Every structure is written in structure tokens, then in C-alpha cells.
Image: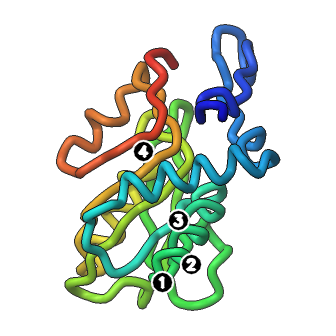
Amino acid sequence: MKKLEEYITSIPDFPEKGIIFRDVTSVLQDADGFRLAVDSYMKMLEGVEFDVVVGIEARGFIFGATLAYLLHKPFIPARKPGKLPRETVSMEYELEYGTDSIELHADAVTPGQRVVLVDDLIATGGTVEAVAKLVERLGGKVVKIVFLMELAGLAGRQRLSGYDIDSAIIYEGK
């Protein structure tokens, strides 16, 4: 059986020269790769007590919803602005060039709930940090943050130093 890393397609010079894009869709389109990825997330969550799973748009939905189903937990989507139909709370965060925003339904997390955040990739950590702050604003406690891949050269883990973070694959560069 192949290792998880072997299912990731690395695309040099995308979206710009000098960047190596780590494509998660090659994992998803292979049944063995997808199973291995989900098994990796499940292993990272062993022994973690939590109440709900928050998946971060968009690929965090795929893995987060799968984990929520397997672990019989509620699933909450963290979405781009204007995508959630009820009252929301939002958080703006910095990007390399500009800002973006992320939202949760205002009733998505209740005070005291223990929350796991799921995404496919951590780079600078800005998006996941914004989601963690939204969960905390709603009274939840982020007990674990899990990723399939981590780009260690972009220092997202340092940005999230107050949280318990785990990544199945860590790439040293950007």
C-alpha cells in the first residue's frame, strides 16, 4: 500500500513561480488515498473528547463531514461571506495581499461545546485562526485542529501556538 504522501500531486510554479502547489484532489479521486487520508484524521482525533466538528470552506467540508459522520458528531460549516442563510457571526483576517472574511451561523456553537476544526491545509494559519476566534466568541472551546497537510515554511503553526494542532503530512517549504 502506498503512503499518504504518494497520493498528493505536487505542481511546481503554481499559482506563481517558486511555489509548489500541493493538490489534495489527487487524494480524493483515489479510493485508497481518500481512505488513507480519513484514517489519518481519525488517528489524530484518537482520545480527543469533543462535541462538534467545524469544517472550513471548502475542502475542510469534505474531510470534516466525513469525520462527523463516522464519529456520530454534528457538522458545522465555516463559510465565505454570504453563503449561510441565517444570522451569522463573521471574522475578517489578513491575507498576503488584502483581507478576507469567514462566517459561522450565530447558533452553530453553544457555550461550553468542545470543538474540533478540520481543514485540508495549513499555510499561514489566518483562516483557521479566524474560525477558532469565532468559535470562542460563541462560547465554544477549540480542543483540536487537524490538517491533512502543513506548509511549515509559512509558519501557520506558530500563529496558532495556543492550540493543539496536528497534521498528517508536513512539508518543510512553502
Label drawn at residue 69: 2
User: In the displayed structure, does residue 138 sit left or right of residue 119?
Assistant: left
- Tell me how far mark 1 sits from mark 2, CA to CA: 5 Å
Label drawn at residue 126: 4
Image location (x, y in percent) of residue 122: 47, 39
Query: Label 1: which residue?
Result: 72
Q: Amino acid at mark 2?
A: Tyr
Q: Is residue 144 above or below residue 153?
A: below
Query: Label 3: which residue?
Result: 55
Q: In the orientation shown, which residue stands out farthest toward the front?
A: 1
Q: Amino acid at mark 3?
A: Gly
Q: Amino acid at mark 4?
A: Gly
- Dot 3 lies on which element? strand
Residue at horizontal 44 percent and vertical 28 percent from the top: 170
Q: Is residue 3 above or below residue 58?
A: above
Circle 2 Cα neighbour tier, 10 Å, few/some/many (<14 / 14–19 / ≥20): few
